[in-house]
Amino acid sequence: MLTVGIVDDGIGFVPTLTKLKQVVSAHFICMVNGDHFPLGNCNGKALITIGSSALTKLTELGCDAVVFSSVALSSRCLKPLTQAHPDVAIFGCDAPVMHASTYTASRVLVVGDAFAVRSQSLSGVIPVAMPDFPALAEVGDERDIVRYISECCEQLYGQFDCIALANSSMNMYKHCFSRVFPNVQIFDSLEGVARRIRKKYRKFPKDDSVVTVIDASGAEIGEKYSIFLD
């Protein structure tokens, strides 16, 4: 069976896992690196170190492919690690700004952590940092999440035509953004990586995928996330 590693710092791995299970049957090893939560606060050098360590561990565990679910890891690590490890299939989940930009000739609201928002320099982009979102996502109180989205973004209503989610945990709560902005198209970071994996492996999804959740040391921590995986 194909073995796919997924790297994130928290709950963001769940929507990535869910999306990939729809396109390929595999043993998924989800590495949750909580020691560096949230990854968006790390600088570029630290992100490469974290990504390289995760890649080494997951390949040692037999992964045929590794997916950086974290947008911060993807944007900083994908190119250098692909160049350094040409024999490993590495995929990233990127902020879907280009996809969103093709949807409209106007402006795109990009929401994410500090790292993802800092990296957006395209014309027509309105970057909004939401530094508290990862912690709120871990708790999972949707009322607080909706309230926080409103506090950060509602004053910009009417200034953008679509939203690009630049943090993996936001994919888990995409519906909360829709509750605040019910008539706005929302793009997440998962369509691209799902399409690339489906194209590379060309396997039809089945119900026999196996999921293991580990921390950065390799210890199993699936019980912690069982409520989200059942």
Image: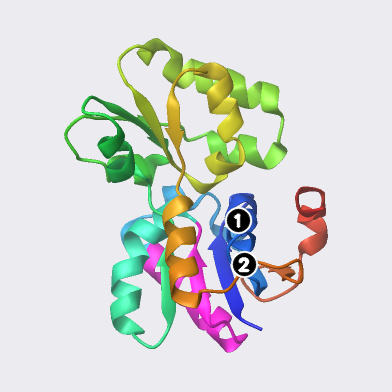
- Quick one: 48 or 21, which is closer to the camera? 21
Q: How is the image coloured?
A: rainbow
Q: Write down the region rendered in magenta.
A: 47-69
**Circle 2: residue type:** Met
Left or right: 94 in relation to 209: left
Please name whichever residue, 187 or 112, is drawn nearer the observer in this view of the structure.
187
Disc 2 crowd rating (10 Å Cα; few below 14, some 14-19, many 20+) is many
**Horizontal relation, residue 73 to residue 57: left or right:** left
Task: Tell me whether circle 1 and circle 2 mark residues in contact (CB < 8 Å).
Answer: yes
Q: Amino acid at mark 1?
A: Phe
Determine whether, in the image, residue 125 is placed left or right of residue 194. left
Task: Work out whether 73 lies above or below 189.
Answer: below
Q: Position of residue 83 (x, y in %)?
A: 28, 79
Quarter of the picture containing the N terminus is bottom right
- The label nearer to you, 1 versus 2, is 1
Number of dots carrying numbers: 2
Identify the residue at horizontal 66%, vertical 67% (top origin).
215
Dominant SS in magenta? helix
Circle 1 packing at 10 Å, graded few (<14), some (14-19), many (20+), is many
| Residue drawn at (57%, 66%) of the image | 6
Indicate yes or no whether the magenta region holds residue 65: yes
In percent of width and height, residue 29 lies at 65, 72
Residue 48 forms part of the magenta stretch: yes
Q: Residue under circle 2?
A: 31
Classify mark 1: helix, strand or loop: helix
Q: CA distance from mark 1 to mark 2?
A: 8 Å
Nearer to the camera, 34 or 120 = 120
Q: Looking at the rendering, which quadrant does residue 222 occupy?
A: bottom right
**Residue wearing tag 1:** 13
SS of the residue under disc 2: strand
- Residue 128: x and y, percent? 36, 29
**Mark positioned earlier in the residue sequence (1 or 2):** 1
